[in-house]
Image (cartoon, grey):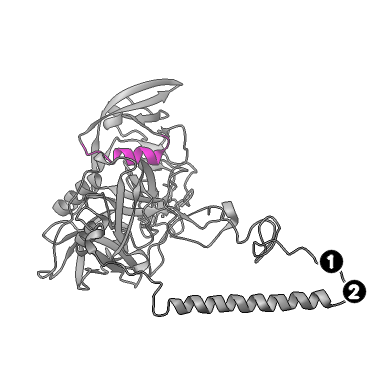
Amino acid sequence: MSTENEGAAVPPEATPPAGPQPDRAPASASGAQAPHAPTAPAAAPPPPAFAPTVAGPAGGGPGDQDRAQGSPGHAPHPGGEPAAGPEQTAQIPAYPTAGHGSSGGGWGQPPYGGHPWGAPPDSPAPKRRNGGLIAAVLAAALVAGGIGGGIGFWAAGQNDGASTTVSATGDAGALNRKPTSVAGIAQKALPSVVTIEAQGATGEGGTGTGFIYDKQGHILTNNHVVASAAGGGKLTATFSNGKKYDAEVVGNAQGYDVAVLKLKNASDAPLNPLPLGKSSHVQVGDATIAIGAPFGLSGTVTTGIISAKDRPVASSDGGGSSASYMSALQTDASINPGNSGGPLMDAAGNVIGINSAIQSAGNGGLGGESGQSGSIGLGFAIPIDQAKRVAQDLIKTGKPVYPQIGVQVGMRETGDGATIAQTGNNGSDAVTPNGPADKAGLQPGDTITKLDDTVIDSGPTLISEIWQHKPGDTVTLTYKRAGKEHTAKVTLGQRTGDK
């Protein structure tokens, strides 16, 4: 969803790996990315039909085990980011909008016919052959006008020196600015949110957001925010007080779209970590607060609610060879390009997610609108439970760890499940020999329809659900084979790194 990468209707699909690929090249269900398979900015991996995209890491061809079959879907963020500006947003059809005016007339015309100013027209006077009545009417109008003017002058005179304005009492206590109010939470959180500027070695870059993760100076953000500078570029982080510090990438996870930075020479920086909540406790309807730098406007605060949970989202920033997948928190808080990497907070001021993608109007469709981008109330955040686990791995080793089941599944089909490919990429086995799925008895051609209690309708959904767990977790897979339903317990394996 360029959360900001900030996000689209059915997001555009990513360009598949270089070289000829069959229409249904399998990808691994762990979401492993194919090395050396750059994608075009406008082409990201295809998410499920309903999944938005972000301007996050670009999708590429599958490679390792647990990769999806075919190009992963592009998400709202769904869209690639421009060369030196805010993250791009993937587009969806615009909602139809009402035009100006109403039926029955154009500008200045009343709706449903009738008088332009809302008053009925005077009844026509009977025709006379002389001008006596006309003169009388004119004289009456002049007299009425004079009387009206006189009354107005008299009324004004009686109130001479009085004011019609009403002044507020100025009682700040009457406003809700308690620590648990939006104003109270924003006042406390803003000093811990930074605006990140990333510039690549060749000059490309953009702006995003991050927030203080710990007192050691680590900052949590999206990978797509810093991807352009991860290979030798320049990163800066600016606090709400205007102080700017250089930063470096400690580790980044393309598949999760998470990155950890560390400030340089920041002994005087206000390192007050934001409290982390539990995204597993979030319920639909809970209040949300989003903080970020949409279109470079640092310190922007917006509010909304949790609109949905476990929303599968595939994303790409157009700058790498890997797709990102998340089982996202959906919110209607206004999120735009530049919000990516910023905190999504609950009503108690705890971080429950990292804003990462939006679905945005602008690719035609309903209403025939085009060329528009920005928030339409469909924003997506990486659950903080997952982001925290990834951040700990990145701080400890500099590399992400991905859980996997050891199969390659189709990525284009949606609605009926995630089907294990008959043959893997480059002639590899679609089911990794002696891998988790193989040990559980799964075979090529099996269609996985559920993971625990979650319905699986596509390859990206399977990957995003697996990635909510950690290696060593045991999950129950429900799958169909030859029309019959089966279940199997699978203990998740792991893959280290993005390559």
Question: Can you tell which quarter of the image residue 441 is in?
Answer: top left
Q: Is residue 416 above or below residue 312?
A: above
In the drawing, does residue 428 fall left or right of residue 138? left
- Circle 2 residues within 10 Å: few <14, some 14–19, many ≥20: few
**Mark pair 1, 2: CA separation:** 10 Å
| Disc 2 element | loop
Q: Position of residue 415 (x, y in %)?
A: 47, 34
- Foreground of the two, 141 or 62: 141
Instruction: Name, please, the residue furthest toward the right.
Output: 129
Q: 44 or 464: nearer the eye?
A: 464
Q: Which residue is mark 2?
A: 129
Residue visible at 22% across and 73% down? 242
* Residue 211: % across, % down: 22, 59
Q: Which residue is mark 1?
A: 126
| Residue 124 occupies quadrant | bottom right
| Residue 373 drawn at (x, y percent) | 46, 60
| Farthest-out residue, top | 484
Badge 2 amino acid: Arg
Q: Which of 449/142 is in front?
A: 142
Of the residues shown, which amino acid type is indicated by label 1? Answer: Pro
Q: Secondary structure at mark 1?
A: loop
341 to 166, vertically: above or below: above
Choose between 84 and 20: the one closer to the eye. Answer: 84
Residue 460 covered by magenta stretch: yes
Query: In the image, which residues are magenta?
Result: 457-471
User: Which numbered disc covers residue 234?
Assistant: none
